[in-house]
Image (cartoon, rainbow, N blue to C red):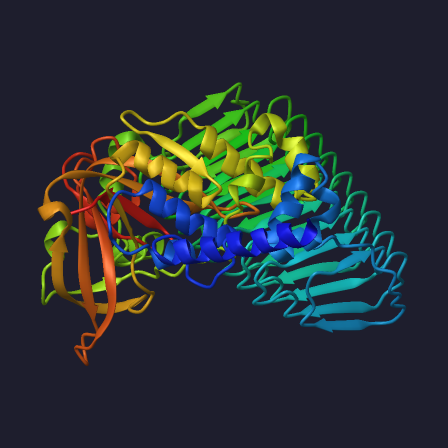
Amino acid sequence: MTLLLLLLFIFFISLTVVSAGAGGSVSGENPFTPKAYLSRYWTKEIRNDLAKPAFLLSKASPLNAVDSVGFSKLAAQNDLSSHLPVFCAAANLLCFPDLSPSLEKHDRDSSFAGYSNRNFTNYGSDRLGGADSFKNYSKDENIPVDSFRRYSRDSAGHKDNFVNYGSNGNVVDESFNSYATGATGGSGEFTTYADSVNVPNLRFTSYSDDSNGRGQSFKAYSVNANAGDQRFASYGKNGNAAVDEFNNYGTSANVIGSGFSGYGQKGNAANDTFINYGNDQNNPQNTFKNYAEGGNFAVDTFMNYRENANVGDDSFQSYAKDTNSAKVNFANYGKSFNIGTDKFSRYGRGADKSIGFKIYGVNTTFKEYAKKGVAFAKYTNVSSEKSTRMGVSGNLVKRWVEPGKFFRESMLKKGNVMPMPDIRDKMPKRSFLPRSISSKLPFSTSKISDLKRIFHAGDNSSMETMIVDSLNECERAPSQGETKRCVGSAEDLIDFATSVLGRNVVVRTTENVKGSKQNILIGSVKGINGGRVTQSVSCHQSLFPYLLYYCHSVPKVRVYEADIHDPSSKAKINHGVAICHVDTSAWSPSHGAFLALGSGPGRIEVCHWIFENDMTWTVAD
């Protein structure tokens, strides 16, 4: 009986492989793998004889047949968390290392070069004097995760120097908890901290709390960073004569959020200086809560705050409230191009202070603002701001919007030379999960605690942030006329595209990344569906532990394929896919496309290339 079952199983396997070779899986591949199943699913759902898209098949889960069944069972039993490292490695997921506290002892001066993924717990605690240097720490790392807990706590005269910390990283997670709490004297210096990183998540909690005479300096902090958050909670709280300086904080960064809660709260004789804070940024988001509240003889200076930024949203709540003999100076505050939002709630309320604003940009709201002791040297009104907006220089636009990121339809002409932006995929490499696993995992903000447990996401960690941000975007109500869905399996991706466009569809992406960040020569151009205005489904990656796409219907577009050549050699180097949005009436006036191209919503069409690993679906020609 056993032999008969074995022979039947072998016969079934061979029969499946043969039939797969005729139009299902790749011949010779195990038919039970997720990739083989995806190939058969494509054949079943797509009603045309066009070749299967190799780039989409390459995103299938790399799990073998046995592991796919095993992990699916663990997901059903709600037990993936206890097998997370093995699961992440086998399924090609984005998971952060679980850092255990370091037991290393360092009783003398130390120099760290090239470190990454470390947990420094109680490092430098109770040290008397000395200096520690961190050089090129986590530099050029893809996903660095570092934790400094109680670093230099209760030390005296101890100096910390961080040079090139976390620079050029991708999805950076740095945590400084109780750093230098209770320290006396000494200093902490951060030079070129998190420069040019992608999606930083930087946290300073209780940094220098209850310290005495300790100075902190941040130079070139998060310069040129892209999309992320910094949080300073209880920074310098209850400190005495603390000196904190932020130079070039977030300069030229893109969509950076900074939160300062309880910064310098109840401090004595604090001296805080922000120089070039948020300058040349695109849409910075800054929140100051209870900053320097209840302080005594504090001096807070903001110089060139949000100078030449685009839009931006700043909130000052209970800033310098109930302070004694405080001095708060804002020089060149909020001189943004395109009006941002500034909210001052209970600012300076109940305080004995002197507050001065010099050259203040257009303000939105002052609520319960202490009117005595406040001086505005030059306040920009709306009419003068409009004239300022007209003077945005080309250099600033290039900082905010990469050349070639947006272009007009007329530029897609054979023989035309134009810049191409960096179309390389900067997100961590991940694969889809098989539907048999993804369907068993929670996927909603109401289940965030379960997701955090499964993927070992600590509170306020990068993992928690990216999970919450992606879920919020997925649960956002669709725009007018939009149909949207987030998909975590290739099968779900196919189902959504066919539900919008029908089953006679084709999916396209730009062939490779050659030509990125350089001028290109446009070769032959083909308009999809005869160049007529059509509907497409565009899919963009979201940052999540497994490969997740945000897909949405895009009405009123034209889609093009174009050969891309090197302008010098004339050799063909790429085959690009571009999409042109004909109706831009619902876009924001501050959209980067209008900064780069001029004009405004509904007045021009806007085109862009399909970047690496993004895709667009249309009805097949």
Apparent side of residue 411 relative to residue 34 in the rendered image (left or right):
left
Question: Considering depth in this image, is 376 or 612 the residue closer to the camera?
Answer: 612
Question: Considering depth in this image, is 6 or 311 the residue closer to the camera?
Answer: 6
Residue 90 percent across, percent down from the top left: 62, 56
Taking the view exactly as shown, the residue that stands out farthest to the top is: 368
- When asked about the image quadrant of residue 537, the answer is top left
Q: Residue at x 28, y 44 (%)?
A: 617
Vertical order, 245 against 496 (above or below): below
Q: Does the rendering let one see residue 571?
A: yes
Question: Considering depth in this image, is 22 or 151 the residue closer to the camera?
Answer: 22
Q: Residue at x 51, y 52 (%)?
A: 12
Apparent side of residue 412 relative to residue 203 in the rendered image (left or right):
left
Residue 353 percent across, percent down from the top left: 62, 31
- When asked about the image quadrant of residue 396, the answer is bottom left
- When asked about the image quadrant of residue 349, the answer is top right
Taking the view exactly as shown, the residue that stands out farthest to the bottom is: 569
